[in-house]
Image (spheres, grey):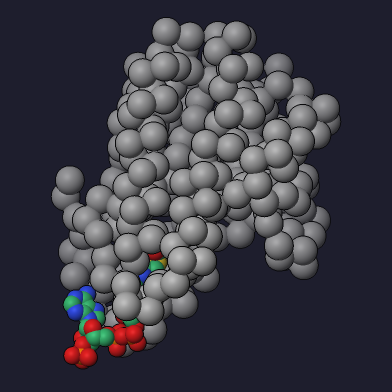
Amino acid sequence: MARVAVVTGGTRGIGEAISIALKDMGMQVAATYAGNEERAKEFADRTGIKAYKFDVADHQACIDGIAAIEGDLGPVDVLVNNAGITRDTTMKRMDHAKWQDVIDTNLGGCFNMAKAVFEGMQSRGYGRIVNIGSINGQAGQYGQVNYAAAKSGIHGFTKALAQEGARNNVTVNAIAPGYIDTDMVAAVPPDVLGKIIAKIPVNRLGKASEIARGVAFLVGEDAGFVTGSTLSINGGQHMY
Ligand code: CAA
């Protein structure tokens, strides 16, 4: 039986590349998205991967969303918590909403989605969870106290949940991407981005497919001894 995988924020950017990679591994994939209908429809038509609309920051929506996916495809074996947003600005200008939205989506989303699938994985004795953190959760970044805190939280969440899942063959790992060529990074002002790229030893942005390659490794059936780890994929920008 094909494994069932859920990729949050799975219709564009890094998530799109992950959804396609998992499909190419023979999995049945459900990609979630929060708002961009047009892009989700284009993605679903092009790839044949079904897209489900719900907000990962909304706890009940995640419980209901997973129930709908499991109704269509069967029990979830693989969860990739990829959905994330930025609200970059300096501390002086950061209002409470910019803090809370990023914490609720990027970190709260990991809890909400894992909560919906973890017990099932434990009881069936198999699961793979991969959480997408960030170089900026490892090293911090000017103008990102919200994002860096949420991503850093993801790395702690990963190590704690890995300890709970281990005895039932449920692995939990993180990937810490560096700067990847996506819409999110394209939103960084060009002069700022130029300075960042100049500090990346391989001297370029990463590709979404280069993150998907790491996810494909971590969700493999033969990766059962890898748990609680963080795989940095950042062109050498931060060696952690
Ligand atoms: N270190 C020290 N000082 C810095 C700095 C840094 N890294 N970046 C900017 N500054 C300084 C500037 O030199 C400037 O100083 P002066 O006024 O003396 O010239 C001052 O701070 C203000 O800088 P800006 O003009 O850039 O300020 P702004 O208010 O227009 O913008 C900002 C602030 C929104 C944070 C902007 O700098 C920015 O977008 N930075 C990039 C943040 C970033 O890397 N985000 C990553 C998004 S992608 C992502 O998150 C994916 C992932 O996981 C990697």
Indicate which quadrant contains ligand 1: bottom left
The residue sitting at 77% across, 63% down in the picture is 37
Could you tell me residue 237's position as x and y percent? 21, 59
Asked if residue 113 is positioned above or below residue 89 in the image, the reply reads: above
Left or right: residue 15 versus residue 45 is left
Task: Point out the image quarter for the C terminus.
Answer: top left
Q: Is residue 204 left or right of residue 44?
A: left
Q: Which residue is depicted at the point 42% across and 16% down?
A: 164
Query: Residue shown at 59%/17% (left/top)?
Result: 119
Q: Position of residue 178 (x, y in %)?
A: 32, 58
Residue 176 visible, this angle: no
Taking the view exactly as shown, the residue that stands out farthest to the right is 72
Q: Position of residue 55 (x, y in %)?
A: 67, 51
Q: Is residue 221 visible?
A: yes
Residue 161 left/right relative to 56: left
* Quadrant in the picture for the N terminus: top right
The quadrant in which residue 124 appears is: top right
